[in-house]
Amino acid sequence: MSAHACRDDYEALCERVRLLCGVDLLQYERGQMERRVRTWAQRRGAASLPGYGDLLRRDPDELDAFVDRVTIDVSHLWRHEEQWDALQQDVLHEIAARSGRIRAWSAGSWNGAEAFTLAAVCREVVPEAPVTVVATDLDQRMVTRARTGEFSAEDARSTPAMVLHRHFQPLEGGAWRASRALRALVRFELGDPLRMPIPKARYDVIMGRNAGTGEVRDALHARLVEALAPGGYLVVGASEGVADPRSLRLVRTHRFVYRKG
C-alpha cells in the first residue's frame, strides 16, 4: 500500500470516528496517534482500517473500547503536584484578593479529576471566595462520567490524605466520590475548545493541560488566552509550554504557568 493510501485510510477512519462520537483524533500528534490506532485495529483482528471503521459503526461497545484505548490519558486527582503548589501558594490568593472570587475553566476535563482538584484547592486556599469551575470535554461519555465525581483508589493516589477526607467521600473498593459541596462548584459541559464559541475575558484561571502538539497546541493556547480576563492565569501541561508567550501577552510566572497582561 502506498504512503498516500495509508494517509487516506487513517484520515478516513478519524473522520468516521468524529461523526460517530464527536472525538477528533486528528487533533492529536499524528505519528503517535496513528501508530496507536493501527496497532489497536490489528489486535482486534481488523484486516484494514476501512474494515475496522465498519466494525466501529456496527458495534457501539467496540467504539467505546477503541476511543478509551487510543485517547488514553494519565488524568488523576492532583496530577502534576508542583502546578497545584503554585496555585495554592501564589495564584489563587492573588486572584481572590483582587476580584473577590474565582472563575475557572478546565478546558479538557477528561474524567473530571482536574476540575475537582481545582475546586478542592480553591476551597482549601480561599474558602470564603465564591468559586465556579466550568469543565468541558469533547467526548460525551467522559462528560457523563465526570459528572458522577467518582474516582478509583488509583485516581486518588496523589491526593493529600487530609484534603481527600475533607472533600471526598469513601466508596466501596477504595474508590472516592467528590462531596456534594464540591460537586456544586463544578459544571460539566460538552465542548471542543478549538471549535466552540469562546467567551471573551471571562475566566481568572484556565487549565489547558492536554493541548497536544504543534499547530493544534498553538491554536488552542491562543483561544484559551482570549477567554482569560486581564491578570488571569493559564496553566499548561508539563510538556506543553506556550511557544511564543509574548505574542499572546503572557508572562511566565511559574513553571508552565502564565499570567495574561
Image (tube, grey):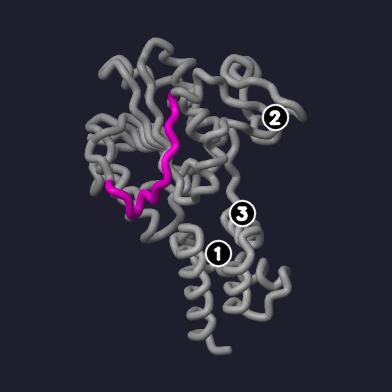
Q: Between residue 17 and residue 77, name the one nearer to us.
A: 17
Residue placed most toward the observer, 228 or 80: 228
Q: Quadrant of residue 95?
A: top left
- The outermost residue toward the bottom is 1
Of all residues shown, which one is farthest toward the front?
A: 58
Tell me the amino acid under the disc marked 1. Met
Mark 1 neighbour class, 10 Å CA radius: few under 14, some 14 to 19, many 20 or more? some
Q: Residue at x 40, y 60 (%)?
A: 214
Q: CA distance from mark 1 to mark 2?
A: 31 Å
Q: Secondary structure at mark 2?
A: loop
Q: Residue at x 73, y 74 (%)?
A: 45
Front position in the image: 255 or 87: 87
How much space separates mark 2 and mark 3, taking CA atoms? 20 Å
Check if residue 212 falls in the magenta segment: no
Residue interval drawn in magenta: 185-197
Identify the residue at image location x=28%, y=48%. 197
> Which residue position is annotated with label 2?
175
Q: Is residue 55 above or below residue 97?
A: below
Q: Is residue 163 left or right of residue 45?
A: left
| Amino acid type, residue under disc 2 in the picture | Ala
Q: Residue at x 49, y 51 (%)?
A: 139
The amino acid pointed to by label 3 is Asp
Q: Main secondary structure of the magenta part?
A: loop
Classify 240 as above or below 227.
Answer: below
In the drawing, what numbered circle is on residue 68?
A: 3
Report the label total.
3
Q: Position of residue 203 (x, y in %)?
A: 30, 32
What is the x, y in percent for residue 188? Answer: 44, 37
Mark closer to the observer (1, 2): 2
Residue 15: tell me if it is visible: yes
**Above or below, 14 relative to 224:** below
